């Protein structure tokens, strides 16, 4: 249960507040005010008035809605209270999809994977909506706040299918939507960032893409062996570093020790500290760089 960060925040008096944006009807023939418009207006106001960034978080396999909310809340609390000095405060927006929240071998995994593929269309619409809104914002109304994306586990499979939907709607060069994209414990093929039909186009959406992987990730090893999947991106990293654009960074988290189950190392203190620095947007320094493998090591 990946809610340890949320529990810690709650114990320290930072109780979460859930706000729901529903469809709001208007008089006459005018279309209703959609919940997405209300949400984006609220986020833009927070980013402009309080100087905040926004991180969109897509959860992974075997995650209930309550667990996804708790993890998103814990991420927001950590980034706001434990980030490096000078880091911008960050809003976290959860993009949830209907995971079964179970570890039943084969059936739950297959069900989650099918749901992740179908949900990709909805995430694709969200990405297109964000891109459209960013283009509509007038220069004098723009803010310095940045938008980031974090996908964990099978959430990367959701993103993979979202990219197909985006590409179908915008077959030309895609607009840059995100400052940072973080692919955590990715349950997608190791060559995903090389293939246009998979995740290669993500690099067009972001200033930088960072892959976090762990060779001791038992869940992804099981995915390889029992589900008949090819090598996973989140297990040993990209299949061929030489074929990736320079804007893709890779971070090896194999040595990270953490108490979280089902490959939840993205919530470990060392990983979250690196995430906070990454969201800050600065180039990575030489500390931890492994030239032999072309990646940083935590």
Image: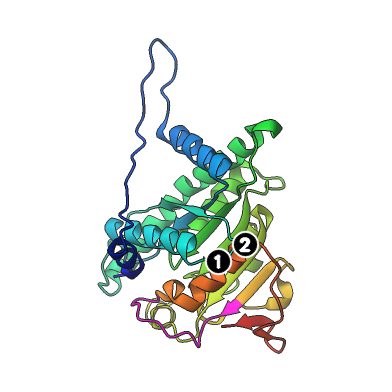
Q: Callout 1: few (<14), some (14-19), or many (20+) C-alpha neighbours within 10 Å?
A: some
Q: Is 139 on the left or on the right of 112, as rendered?
A: right
Q: Nearer the viewer, residue 11 or 161?
A: 11
Q: Is 264 on the left or on the right of 149, as rendered?
A: left
In this view, 202 is above or below 135: below
Task: Read off the magenta span.
Answer: 251-263
Q: Can you identify the residue that label 2 sits on?
A: 280
Q: Is 171 on the left or on the right of 263, as rendered?
A: right
Give the secondary structure at mark 2. Answer: helix
The N terminus lies in quadrant: bottom left
The C terminus lies in quadrant: bottom right
Give the residue displayed 38% in from the left and 12% down from the top. Answer: 27
Is there a contact, CB below 8 Å, between mark 1 and mark 2? yes
Q: Residue 70, how many percent across, how many down?
A: 32, 60
Q: Callout 2: few (<14), some (14-19), or many (20+) C-alpha neighbours within 10 Å?
A: some
The colouring scheme, among rainbow, by chain, secondary structure or one colour, is rainbow
Does 225 lie within the magenta span?
no
Q: Is 118 on the left or on the right of 7, as rendered?
A: right
Q: Nearer the viewer, residue 36 or 238?
A: 36
């Amino acid at each position: 249960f990946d809610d340890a960060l949320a529990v810690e925040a709650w114990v320290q008096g930072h109780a979460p507040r859930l706000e729901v944006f529903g469809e709001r009807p208007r008089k006459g023939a005018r279309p209703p005010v959609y919940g997405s418009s209300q949400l984006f207006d609220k986020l833009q106001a927070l980013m402009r008035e309080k100087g905040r960034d926004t991180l969109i978080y897509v959860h992974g396999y075997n995650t209930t809605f309550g667990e996804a909310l708790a993890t998103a809340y814990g991420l927001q609390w950590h980034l706001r209270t434990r980030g490096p000095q000078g880091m911008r405060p960050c809003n976290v927006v959860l993009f949830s999809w209907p995971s079964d929240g179970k570890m039943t071998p084969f059936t739950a995994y297959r069900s989650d994977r099918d749901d992740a593929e179908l949900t990709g269309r909805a995430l694709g619409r969200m990405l297109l909506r964000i891109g459209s809104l960013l283009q509509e914002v007038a220069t004098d109304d723009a803010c310095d706040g940045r938008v980031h994306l974090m996908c964990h586990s099978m959430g990367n499979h959701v993103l993979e299918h979202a990219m197909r939907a985006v590409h179908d709607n915008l077959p030309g060069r895609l607009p840059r939507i995100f400052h940072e994209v973080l692919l955590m414990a990715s349950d997608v093929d190791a060559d995903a960032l090389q293939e246009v039909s998979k995740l290669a186009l993500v690099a067009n959406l972001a200033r930088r893409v960072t892959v976090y992987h762990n060779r001791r990730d038992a869940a992804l090893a099981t995915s390889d062996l029992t589900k008949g999947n090819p090598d996973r991106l989140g297990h040993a990293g990209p299949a061929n570093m030489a074929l990736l654009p320079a804007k893709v960074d890779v971070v090896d988290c194999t040595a990270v020790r953490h108490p979280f189950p089902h490959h939840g190392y993205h919530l470990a203190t060392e990983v979250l500290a690196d995430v906070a620095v990454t969201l800050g947007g600065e180039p990575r320094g030489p500390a931890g760089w492994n030239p032999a493998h072309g990646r940083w090591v935590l």
